[in-house]
Amino acid sequence: QSALTQPASVSGSPGQSITISCTGTSSDVGGYNYVSWYQQHPGKAPKLMIYDVSNRPSGVSNRFSGSKSGNTASLTISGLQAEDEADYYCSSYTSSSTLLFGGGTKLTVL
Amino acid sequence: EVQLVQSGAEVKKPGESLKISCKGSGYSFTSYWIGWVRQMPGKGLEWMGIIYPGDSDTRYSPSFQGQVTISADKSISTAYLQWSSLKASDTAMYYCARGGRELLPDYWGQGTLVTVSS
């Protein structure tokens, strides 16, 4: 099982919107609506931002949204803020009843 | 409040054994999966495996099958990750995480740093 594919880095200016993609296969991302996104600040544990492709846990800003088309899931952050600068990881349930993570994307707020 | 509290940092020599722990509280420990995730220095997250404390059903990533052992003691709401013979390449931060829908993590522990060096 290979890791899900994410861009290594993305950047945007405060107030702008950015989108991070997460590409898998029909055996994981494309086969299930079970994709989560996590935010990780340096030296901290990951934090759940999106689950079940597009649902936000309580307390997560509505500036974060998720979607999926085919084998690719996406995380969009609107109205970028300095505090959004972090690493972001996607994860998907798989047909082997296991999980896969993406390689991670470093978001830089310019 | 859901909490996962992991054991402290470890420094070990190659070939030694190790067992780290993750204690859950604030929810029904036997009703949720508990998984383990590795993060090597400067690298991304890697899913290692998961256990359902209710019946000890355990699943491993093919990359970690046979390399580690995941277990749980439901009487004390604690999950474990164990190595029988550590290697320098096992140096990493290890996170436990509660499995929500379809095993995907919803709550995370604070991490346990394992350093293996001669």
Image (tube, coloured by chain):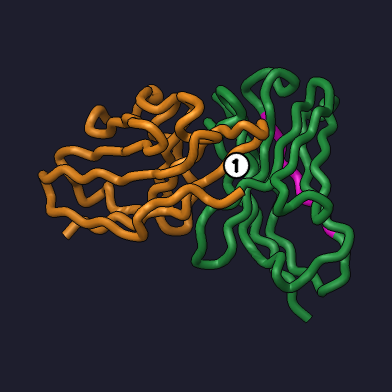
Q: Main secondary structure of the magenta part?
A: strand
Numbered range of the magenta stretch: B18-24
Chain (green): B
Q: Would residue B97 appear left or right of A68 to someone viewing this image? A: right
Residue at 50%, 34% in the rendered image: A26
The quarter of the picture where residue A108 lies is bottom left
The correct choice, above or below, for B22 with respect to B111 in the image is above
Q: Amino acid at mark 1?
A: Gly
Q: Would residue A38 appear left or right of B52 to someone viewing this image? A: left
Tell which of B77 and B48 is nearer to you: B48
Query: Measured from the top left, where is residue B34 in percent x and y?
Result: 68, 33
The correct choice, above or below, for B13 with respect to A60 in the image is below
**Which of the image's four quarters has the C terminus of chain A?**
bottom left
Q: How many marks?
A: 1
The residue indicated by pointer 1 is B109
Residue at 20%, 45% in the rendered image: A18
The quarter of the picture where residue B114 lies is bottom right
Chain (orange): A
> Is residue B4 a member of the stretch shown in magenta?
no
Residue at 48%, 45% in the rendered image: A46
The quarter of the picture where residue B102 lies is top right
Residue at 83%, 38% in the rendered image: B71
Query: Measured from the top left, where is residue A48 in percent x and y?
Result: 44, 35
